[in-house]
Image (cartoon, helix red, strand yellow):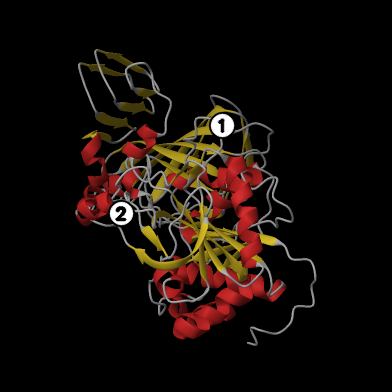
Amino acid sequence: MDILKKSSISAITLTPVILAGGSGSRLWPLSRSSYPKQYLRINEENNFSLLQNTMLRLKGIKNVNNPIIICNEEQRFIVAEQMREIKIIPQKIILEPLGKNTAPAITLAALEAFKVNQDSLLLILSSDHEIKDEAIFRKVIEDGINYANKGRLVTFGVPPTRPDTGFGYIQTNDELTENLKFSKIKKFVEKPKLEIAEKMIQDKHYLWNSGIFLFKACVILKELEKFEPKMLNFCRESLEKGLKDLEFQRIDEASFSKCSGLPIDIAVMEKTDLGTVLTLNARWNDVGSWKAIWENSNKDNNGNTLKGKIIVKQSLNSYIRSEDRLIVGLGIKDLIIIDTEDAILISHKETAHEVKKVVEELNKNNFSEGKLNKKTYRPWGSFTSIEKGESWQVKRLEIKPKASLSLQMHHHRAEHWVVVNGTAKIEIDEKISILSENESIYVPLGSKHRLSNPGKLPLILIEIQSGNYLGEDDIVRFEDNYGRLIRENST
């Protein structure tokens, strides 16, 4: 590949590259790997998810393309649906078969953008950040475009307000002030110990690493060719051996798995001579912990943030959130309390960062609550597990208007459907039935069947499963509107 070949396209556009592959375990139990924090609607100013706000805050910047999004293949339909909600059609949704950190993900996006225009400017964004001063953010990005157009690899540093050990830091060559807001990069510092972080925030040569980058596709690929040629080749190979799947770009797992799992900071930015950091003072927050959520939320006169059905008395400086049940707090202080359908977190604010270790322990001991939500999202809608026994299970299914499950059968279970709201079209062994509210139907074990919503409103059913095995992989598909035929066997 001739990276320096002159582009034939004169108009340079900005392509957002949104990294949406994280698991968000530090915000457990609300965020889990099946539905991590970037897809949650936790913004107090609007009802959009963190992912949606990542794209929406770019409005007002000139010549912005639709994004390239890199996500876990299990979350692809969540990404596609959330982009549809805000009327965005991504250029590409690249599916990672496994997480390999930011350098391989950015390399995939750069290779794809290079095919269209090798001088494309890539704005690398994490999908789980909050930025309160969006006008300032857009202005700093526009300033960064000037440097990136000159062949610089630009990153954005946030002036630290506290000695936070959860953030990485950037050491600059020059001391940044109100009059000097850019510098060459001296080095990156991974999450430091507290005593080191306390010294850093006293030194004007240190900024928090925002994880936002801006550069030309051809420039970052040239630097990758210099510093990480194997990674570049494996990423190129994984794309060449991949395949288009509806609106998604699948990549070859065998090739991609050979990539080193490095962040772009270590792979390129701390080695290159082209690094430039600009000050980003736009009330940035990476929403990395429940304490950070509390710090950036609106509080009552006692410093409490209350979400859901909450009553507190004589309580101070706490974040309490209930997704369903009533929570009553009496005489509490500095606590994080998160209540979901199947798990409750109670933590002091100063130990909330330990949640990630708890999730690792849950997964190690095969607790389903570590990864799975009671509510599971599918391209046709969602299902919620209500109750489960050894040989039976009750679920609530919600099917979107005009959507349909696959034509399928089960080897180990029968199903009974009761329509709660809407109209259901049901095919069982080629016989079609139309069911309305309070009507039910039985699907025998081994029958070929399909459930559809022909109406304009959501269809809600109660599903009772019975059988000797109730796993989601007991599905044989014959037809599917979402391309899930051979590779997957899940609802």
For discs 2 and 1, the disc positioned in front in the rendered view? 2
Q: Residue 204, labelled with which disc?
A: none
Which residue in the protein does label 1 denote?
46
Q: CA distance from mark 2 to mark 1?
A: 35 Å
Q: Which of the marked residues, 2 or 1, is nearer the chain's N terminus?
A: 1
- Horizontal arrangement in the rendering, residue 160 relative to residue 419 (left or right): left
Residue lying at the far top in this picture: please name it. Answer: 313
Residue 159 pos. (x, y %):
43, 48
Which residue in the protein does label 2 denote?
200
Q: Quadrant of residue 205?
A: bottom left
Residue 438 pos. (x, y %):
53, 24
- Is residue 242 in view? no
Q: Residue at x 40, y 54 (%)?
A: 207
- Is residue 9 in view? yes
Q: Residue at x 41, y 76 (%)?
A: 257
Amino acid type of the residue that numbered disc 2 sits on in the rendered structure: Met
Does residue 318 sit above or below 89 in this rendering? above
**Disc 2 on helix, strand or loop?**
helix
Residue 259 pos. (x, y %):
42, 77
Q: Residue at x 45, y 85 (%)?
A: 230
Q: Residue at x 56, y 49 (%)?
A: 379
Residue 13 pos. (x, y %):
72, 62
Relative depth, front residue between 39 and 319: 319
Whether residues under marks 2 and 1 lie with C-beta atoms below 8 angstroms apart, the answer is no
Residue lying at the far bottom in this picture: please name it. Answer: 2
